[in-house]
Amino acid sequence: MSRLLVTGGAGFIGSNFVHYWLDQYPDDLVVVVDALTYAGNLENLAQVQSNPNYRFEHCDINETEKMQTLLRDEAIDVIVNFAAESHVDRSIEGPDAFITANILGTHSLLKAARQVWLIEGANPDNHRFHHVSTDEVYGSLESEEPAFSEQTAYAPNSPYSASKAASDFLVRAYHHTYGMDVTTSNCSNNYGPYHFPEKLIPLVITNILHGKALPIYGDGKNIRDWLYVEDHARGIDLTIKKGRAGETYNIGGWNEWTNIDIVKLVCQLMDKRFASDELLSKRFPECPAAAGLQSETLIEFVRDRAGHDFRYAIDASYSNRELGYEPKVTFEEGIEKTLDWYLSNESWWRAVMDGSYQAWIETNYKAA
């Protein structure tokens, strides 16, 4: 039986991981830590709140002494570090928060783990610090270049990716310098339930339903590799269970799409939903499909963002050979599931978008 500390566990990928882990390993303890900033949402964890093996702690991973206390009191032997600022646009506008969360926060967590596991000797030979990173640390690819492998040199191009690269190196250093048992995974773009609405796929879904413009950077030809979030959780599971200490594993979807093609696909799927379910037109009268129009009419090309990487692609061959990892959810299945989830969970994304959830957090958590 494992006892996990999951940082950033109220966020998009973290909460999906918590659901996955408690379903796969019902006897394990999962302690979630989250600072509940704009992207952390306790509603993401509503389904597990009654689980006796689930705990939630509202705190920041930069609170090193608090992290040490949790590691001791809960006898944690596995840390899964999702906690991070992760939106490139936000990092361009305000990089300081990314340095604080991604670099200083990761170092704080590493210090706490070293103190409890290695210096105090709580788990010198039976621990694992798993760090969740991104393919963006590798920089940008041209159309015909081979996908990123674990041997690809780091070349981050945004404050976000630079901060993640720095955190990856800190994790590596704590293994080679102090002997901490660490692993790192670098993933491609995730999508699925609980995805924060400022990211591409949920933004497109919610904007279509509101009849709002679908802003596409540049010519829309930038390419991303898309990974269903449950497959990412499965890849992390395999890395924790089978990964070798000090190693990095790429977790990808083998699923490259241009941004414009992704947007057009979501538009087409939405139009089909409205054509087959007349109740959707009553629920979302502002959607073009409610008036018999195509959602693609909302597409609007806007000025490209600064330093926009052209292409990301993950070569997950090493993870497949070493861990047996491969995505199980096809993109066709995953995008249908995602669209259905947003149509079925209107109250969740409305509360996030209109600020009512964040106001509740400010009242009930920030003051405390």
Image (cartoon, grey):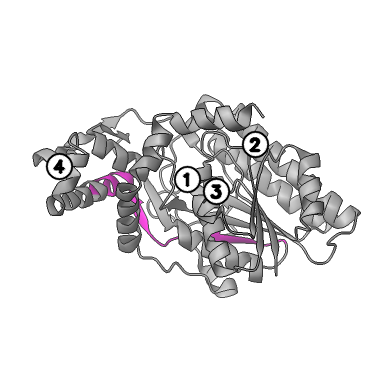
Q: Which residue is mark 3?
A: 138
Q: Amino acid at mark 4?
A: Ala
Q: CA distance from mark 2 to mark 4?
A: 41 Å
Q: Amino acid at mark 1?
A: Ser
Q: Which residue is mark 1?
A: 140
Does residue 25 belong to the magenta stretch? Answer: no
Tag of residue 101: 2
Q: CA distance from mark 1 to mark 3?
A: 7 Å
Residue under the image location 30 percent in, 57 percent down? 336
Residue found at the very far left of the displayed protein:
292
Q: Which residue is mark 4?
A: 289
Q: CA distance from mark 2 to mark 1?
A: 24 Å
Q: Classify residue 118 by image quadrant.
A: bottom right
Q: CA distance from mark 2 to mark 3?
A: 20 Å
Relative to 62, 26 lies left or right: left
Q: Which residues are magenta?
A: 246-264
Q: Are marks 2 and 3 in contact (CB under 8 Å)?
A: no
The reply to whether residue 84 is in sight is: yes
Please tell me whether mark 2 or mark 4 is closer to you in this view.
Answer: 4
Q: Amino acid at mark 2?
A: Ala
Q: Are marks 2 and 4 in contact (CB under 8 Å)?
A: no
Residue 258 at x, y percent in the picture: 32, 48
Q: Nearer the viewer, residue 222 or 281?
A: 281
